[in-house]
Image (cartoon, rainbow, N blue to C red):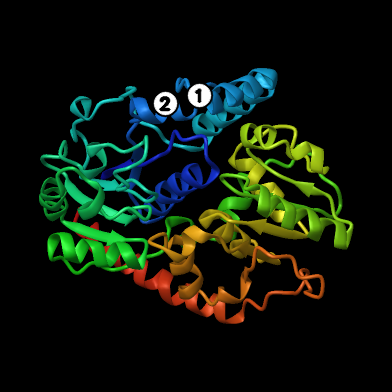
Amino acid sequence: MGETIGIITFHRSHNCGSMLQAYATQTILEKMGFQAEIVNFSNAGQRRLYQPFQIDLSPKTYIKNLVSAIHIKEIRNNDAHYESFISKYLNVGNGDFSRCSELCDTGYAAVVAGSDQVWNVTIADSDDAYFLPWVTHARKIAYAVSFGARNIARYASNPLKYSELINQFDYVSIRENNGQRWVKELTGLDVPVVLDPTLLLELEDFQKIEDDAISTPDKFIFYYSPNYDRNINRLVKQISDKYDLPVICFNAKAFHIKGMGSMGFRLPEYEDPSVYLTLMRRATLVMTTSFHGTIFSTLYGKDFWTIKNGGMFGDDDRVLTLTGQMDLDDRLVSLEFDPHKDYLEKKNYGTYLKMRKRLRDKSMRFLEEATKEL
């Protein structure tokens, strides 16, 4: 193996998209001949975010904590499976860091920030560490970073600081069209839009980390959303009833808080990214609102629908950049149930495959240039 490249991203988020993009970045760098090591950084905000109970004392949070307490055994079991996934599939470096000041780039020829929303300055996970001020000798690379619909110029208290930090990178690439425009406005840099790292791998790279131990019906809808909106739940229920297909969801905390069991929906026996992939593969139909839910539906060649929601039509162009790039706009579906629509309509992936190959080649050229002569 060649030089060691460090990766700093949201690898410890108990979130399938975050963990699988970390796995993908690690894997593609290894395929390029490098040793890839994930920096074991997770700030205090991120650690609180994925705890079973939240410390906010509002009435709404009190109710959420009460529901979590009722289902605490299930939630803790899921957390253990997420941690097991990290141990099994991610090459995490030594140490356990929660502050940017604790980090250094010793031993790395380059450090890659991203992918995921590592440049979203408004979220609990936000940290200057992802802008690499601690990297003083290694090459600085941003790969497919996302602002998560939050323009730094508008939301950061000191945009100039981030302009200077981004300009210190040797190579920068962005995941969304809005992000490309915002980088230009903030820094003057013209940067490419590249694919999320999960789209750089082959299906076999994900199939080998599936968990086939879980049981599922022969036919079912896999319904995946970071936050289960009640109106969207109702749409999925109507589609389920139309085709007499059971619904398997994910994210036990949100599932129980929204009372989704009362709709006849169910959860897998436990959750982690390996289970998520298995559900993708086995599903008859995938319903999602998620960026990575859309990606994995396409990687597995599924019949799927990405449900339109209000956020998509403002600054949050994560899904719309993806669907526009990849001939997937025909899989965006309205929130309103249409009794005459064929929700089991097959997706023709011919054009998608051609567009994915072209964009993958472009993305790989960026990575090859950014890591040249290391």
Q: Secondary structure at mark 2?
A: helix
- Quick one: label 1, few (<14), some, or many (20+) residues within 10 Å? few
Residue 304 to residue 112: above or below: below
Which of the 4 image quadrants contains residue 307?
Answer: bottom right
Residue in view at x 34 percent, y 49 percent: 114
- Name the residue at 62% across, 76% down: 349
Residue 154 appears left or right of 85: left
- Residue indicated by mark 1: 51
Viewer-closest of 16 and 7: 16
Residue placed most toward the observer, 62 or 208: 62
| Label 2 crowd bin: few (<14), some (14–19), many (20+), radius 10 Å | some
Image vertical order of residue 331 relative to residue 253, above or below: below
Q: Is residue 339 above or below residue 71?
A: below
Task: Give me the C-alpha separation between circle 2 and circle 1.
Answer: 7 Å
Is residue 314 something one can see in this rendering?
A: yes
Percent position of residue 191, x then y: 23, 67
Is 102 on the left-hand or right-hand side of 238? left
Q: Which mark is residue 173?
A: none
- Element type where label 1 sits in the image: loop
Task: Quickly name the residue at label 2.
Answer: 47
Q: Is residue 143 left or right of residue 316?
A: left
> Measuring 48% from the left and 78% from the top, which residue is drawn there?
355
| Residue drawn at x 65%, y 19% as measured from the top left | 72
Amino acid type of the residue tagged 2 in the rendering: Arg
Closer to the camera in the image, 335 or 361: 335
Q: What amino acid type should be assigned to the residue bearing mark 1? A: Gln
Please state the horizontal and vertical placement of residue 277, each as a whole percent of the image.
64, 48
Q: Are marks 2 and 1 in contact (CB under 8 Å)?
A: yes
The quadrant in which residue 118 appears is top left
User: Percent position (x, y) of residue 221?
Assistant: 76, 54
